[in-house]
Structures are given as C-alpha cells and as structure tokens.
Amino acid sequence: MSANLKYLSLGILVFQTTSLVLTMRYSRTLKEDGPRYLSSTAVVIAELLKIIACILLVYKDSKCSLRTLNRVLHDEILNKPMETLKLAIPSGIYTLQNNLLYVALSNLDAATYQVTYQLKILTTALFSVSMLSKKLGLYQWLSLVILMAGVTFVQWPSDSQIDSKELSAGSQFVGLMAVLIACFSSGFAGVYFEKILKETKQSVWIRNIQLGSFGSIFGLMGVYIYDGELVSKNGFFQGYNKLTWIVVVLQCLFPWSHPCNSSYFPIWL
C-alpha cells in the first residue's frame, strides 16, 4: 500500500508540475488587449489560498470543531513565536523563488525551463548531505551525474536556436540566471524546512500556514516595491482571467509538495 501511494504521489506531482509550467509559460506569453497580470500579485494570492486550504485541513483534523481549530492555531502559532519565526527564512526564499519562476518562464521556453529547473534535485541533494548528514548511494550519485548531463545538453545551442530570433540572447540569459537562483533557493529552503520539521512535532499544515503568512507579507512588500505604481494605476487584479486563476491555483498547490522532500523525490524513490 505504501509503495502504491508513493508512485501515485509521484504521478500526481509530475502532472502538477508539468501543467504548472505549461500554463504559466502560456499565460506569460499570451498576447491580449490591456495590461498583463502582475506575477508579484499572483504569488501573493497563491500564498493566501494556501493559508485558507491549510486552515481547512487543520479544521478537518480538529474533527470539524471551530473551538478546537482556534485553540490549535493559538497554541501552535501565537503561543510559539520563536518557532513561528523560524519559518521566516524559508518563506522569504520561497517567495523569491516563486517570483523567479515567472521571470524564467517569461524568458525561456517551457522545455528548457523544465529540464534546467531539475537542477534543484542536485542542489537539494548537496544541501541534504551538508546540512542533514545524509548519505547518497552509488545509484543516487549516478542519477545526479545523468541529470547534470541532461541539463548541459538542453542548454547546448543548436542550429535552429542560433537562427531563431524569437528570444534574444539577453532574455535567455536572464531566464537561465532566474532558474539557477531558483534551484539553489529551492534546495536550501527545502532542506532547511525538512530540518525544522524533524526538530519539532508541529504538523505540516501548521508549518504551511506559518510559511504562507510570512510569504504573504514578503509578497506584499514585493508588490509595493516593484509594482506599486502599476497596482495604483490599474488595480491589484489587472490582467487576471481564467487562465491566470488556473496558474494561481496550481502554484498554490505546488509548494505543498516541495518544502519537505519533493525537490529530490525522484532520487529517494
């Protein structure tokens, strides 16, 4: 049963991440009349939806009792400020990472992005070895070498890419740098979050509420700093359509799988 659940989880994760990449890329390159939606606001909305969803899950675990839910949230979050503050670091990194993914997909094609972003498996493995003292077997290191080779080949310019003028060299460089930074941030934040989970007994839903709370704060700061003028001019939800909301929902679900160990799930499987 556990093996079937593991493969089912892997299948859902593959579908989820693939659909997120394709829809996000399409939404960032789709040409429509009017302003395009702001990625910074989409990140904030995704964090808020994640908080709501996790609160509902805690409510379910509390046997659908509002009194129990209120007590759990009060005892586990408000009464443990130092434990809650520990999540500020990975939350800030995840917020940066989510914004970088929009930058990357605005400058890279979906296939190149998807393959390159798998470097997060390598960075997570390296951070887990250094921070959690985990040991990798021969096949796991071999998998990482094959991964590196695949990323190298996908970045190798072909004749069609040289002749193509769809993406400039500058935009490709920006997209590549955004993916690489996101890979390192994902690896560090994922291992850091796993370390926190192992040191405490709080549920992953409580931890995700804490992550989402800080993420919303950091995200709103980003909206104010980088897109404050556009928001004041055209509104917070400028350019939003059905496709945008699909991207937001997928992005809301996506972080649930990577904070702990999905970044290197294929290796540990």
Image (cartoon, rainbow, N blue to C red):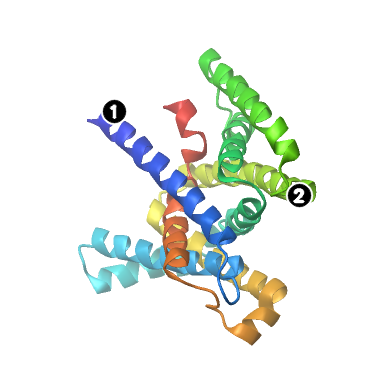
Could you tell whether 240 is left or right of 71 in the image? right
**Is residue 78 visible to the viewer in this orientation of the structure?**
yes
Instruction: Quadrant for the C terminus, please.
Output: top left
Residue 202's place in the image compared with 194, above or below, is below
What residue is pinned by disc 2?
A: 168
Location of residue 39 in the rendering, given as x and y in whole percent from the top left corner: 59, 65
Q: Residue at x 58, y 60 (%)?
A: 28
Q: Residue at x 45, y 51 (%)?
A: 254
Q: Amino acid at mark 1?
A: Ala
Location of residue 133 in the rendering, given as x and y in whole percent from the top left corner: 58, 28
Element at label 1: helix
Element at label 2: loop
Q: Residue at x 49, y 49 (%)?
A: 22
Q: Amino acid at mark 2?
A: Ser
Front residue (pair 163, 216):
163
Residue 85's place in the image compared with 190, above or below, is below
What residue is pinned by disc 1?
A: 3
Q: Residue furthest right?
A: 170
Q: Residue at x 53, y 47 (%)?
A: 193
Between disc 1 and disc 2, the foreground one is: 2
- Residue at mark 1 to residue at mark 2: CA–CA distance: 45 Å
The image quadrant of residue 94 is bottom right
